[in-house]
Image (cartoon, rainbow, N blue to C red):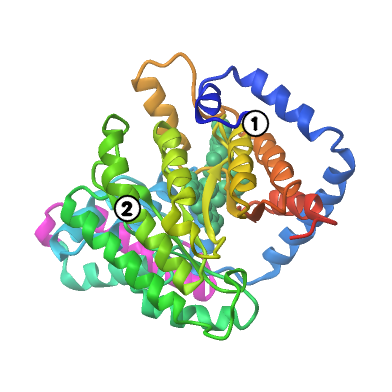
């Protein structure tokens, strides 16, 4: 058992092979689960492929993510909706258009739409001067990209997000709303993000007034880096002084509205601080006085510390007799983690360097979480059909 923060920290840069051996030993004989999961995953994939592809999927088939064009489209989808002024938007469209070779040629309704997009992007690429981009081209390109970005962004505001979610909720889906707030760069921005989170909690909380259990209601995800502009390792005292009260205030609001609040997992460098802040908020008497156990966190399986961190969280839950909701993810910032470790000249990485090792870590950590469902409320976030199937197999017979 590693249940102190410094014990978990010691795993940051452990030898990868050693970590994997420990994880494999914990998983044990896996062959039966794997065979059943593979079959289920194949069925899931066949079912998903039978659905007519949406514009976004059609575009990705045309321009896979591994291609220059696919990556260029992702850049546009991610960045364009956040740029407030038309001139900068045009500049981005042009620079992305110039960065790749666009081909067209698909048939059908999606084909027509994507051909419009490709043709447009190709045409923009051919234009030399920024002022040669006509407002009509810009508008059409922006509209298409907005439609594509819709694959990632539910809505522009929490109100319209809640409205859009209704038809899915009727089918039994639950939502965790993520505000697109990135890291705050200034105190004003941090203030604005905190207020948006607080407003969102009230609006989400006002939904489903008859449901008493947060497990049956939508929740919210919160980024610590959005709450405080100096969320930095070297400013730990300041972080505790300024960020902790903000997180606590949001957690208390979530408790009052009885909705799930999950603290998003961010970079590995601040993982120890992340756990410490979470632990401090979890054990604070201001939160403990509510009979609320919907304050949770996300854990990234690509980190060598994910598996040992479960021991720390288990000890916390046992000591305070409160469930901790955990959302297990693989981790969204792998490239950045590798780059950061290389830039810092570290002799090892805080994340696994082989994709299959992240998968092994995910399976072992999922198994460990599912062994303690009296302490953890397990949530598994993945887009991978095989991972979904393995988690379903691991969950058989568990009381959740
Ligand atoms: C509801 C929800 C909430 C999420 N919240 C968070 C969050 O709070 N924090 C966060 O970081 N992410 C979050 N994610 C994103 C998540 O971490 C993954 O990036 C994403 O879901 C893709 O993982 P997968 O299991 O679907 O994909 P897969 O395709 O099975 O795996 C891709 C993942 O493998 C890992 N990987 C890729 N290459 C390598 C390599 N060479 N070595 C080791 N590992 C590698 C990376 O983690 C990569 O994301 C969330 C996702 C969802 C759906």
CA gap, disc 2 and disc 1: 37 Å
In front: 151, or 184? Answer: 184
In front: 200, or 332? Answer: 200
Where residue 171 sits: x, y (%)?
64, 80
Q: Is residue 199 above or below residue 20?
A: below
Task: Indicate which disc, 2 or 1, sits on the residue closer to the N terminus.
Answer: 2
Residue drawn where x is 37% and y is 27% of the image: 340
Give the numbered dot on residue 357.
Answer: 1
Q: Is mark 1 within 8 Å of ligand 1?
A: yes
Where residue 198 sits: x, y (%)?
34, 67
Where residue 324 sits: x, y (%)?
59, 53
Q: Is residue 398 above or below residue 329?
A: below
Residue drawn where x is 61% and y is 21% of the image: 16
Where residue 267 sits: x, y (%)?
41, 38
Q: Which residues are magenta?
A: 105-132
Q: Is residue 182 visible?
A: no
Q: What element does badge 2 sit on? A: helix
Q: Which residue is mark 2?
A: 245
């Amino acid at each position: 058992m590693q249940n102190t923060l410094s014990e978990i920290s010691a795993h940051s840069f452990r030898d990868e092979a050693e970590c994997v051996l420990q994880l494999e030993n914990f998983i044990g004989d896996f062959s039966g689960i794997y065979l059943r999961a593979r079959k289920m995953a194949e069925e899931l994939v066949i079912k998903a492929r039978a659905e007519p592809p949406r514009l976004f999927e059609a575009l990705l088939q045309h321009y896979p993510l591994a291609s220059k064009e696919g990556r260029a489209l992702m850049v546009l989808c991610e960045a364009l909706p956040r740029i407030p002024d038309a001139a900068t938007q045009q500049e981005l469209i042009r620079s992305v258009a110039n960065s790749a070779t666009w081909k067209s040629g698909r048939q059908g309704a999606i084909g027509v739409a994507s051909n419009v997009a490709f043709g447009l992007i190709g045409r923009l690429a051919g234009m030399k001067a920024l002022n040669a981009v006509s407002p009509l081209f810009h508008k059409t390109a922006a509209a298409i990209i907005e439609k594509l970005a819709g694959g990632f962004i539910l809505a522009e505001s929490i109100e319209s997000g809640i409205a859009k979610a209704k038809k899915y909720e009727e089918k039994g889906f639950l939502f965790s709303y993520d505000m697109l707030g990135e890291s705050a760069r200034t105190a004003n921005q941090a203030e604005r993000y905190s207020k948006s989170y607080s407003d969102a909690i009230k609006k989400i909380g006002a939904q489903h007034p008859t449901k008493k259990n947060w497990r049956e209601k939508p929740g919210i995800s919160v980024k610590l880096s959005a709450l405080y502009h100096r969320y930095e390792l070297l400013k730990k005292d300041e972080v505790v002084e300024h960020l902790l009260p903000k997180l606590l205030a949001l957690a208390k609001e979530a408790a009052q509205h009885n909705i799930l609040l999950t603290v998003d997992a961010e970079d590995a460098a601040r993982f120890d601080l992340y756990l410490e802040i979470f632990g401090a908020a979890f054990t604070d008497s201001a939160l403990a006085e509510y009979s609320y156990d919907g304050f949770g966190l996300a854990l990234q399986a690509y980190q060598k510390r994910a598996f040992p961190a479960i021991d720390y969280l288990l000890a916390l839950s046992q000591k305070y007799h409160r469930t901790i909701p955990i959302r297990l993810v693989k981790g969204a910032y792998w490239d950045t983690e590798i780059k950061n470790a290389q830039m810092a000249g570290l002799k090892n990485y805080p994340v696994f360097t082989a994709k299959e090792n992240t998968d092994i870590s995910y399976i072992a950590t999922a198994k460990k979480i599912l062994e303690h469902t009296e302490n953890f409320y397990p949530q598994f976030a993945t887009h991978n059909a095989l991972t979904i199937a393995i988690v379903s197999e691991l969950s058989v017979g568990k009381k959740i």
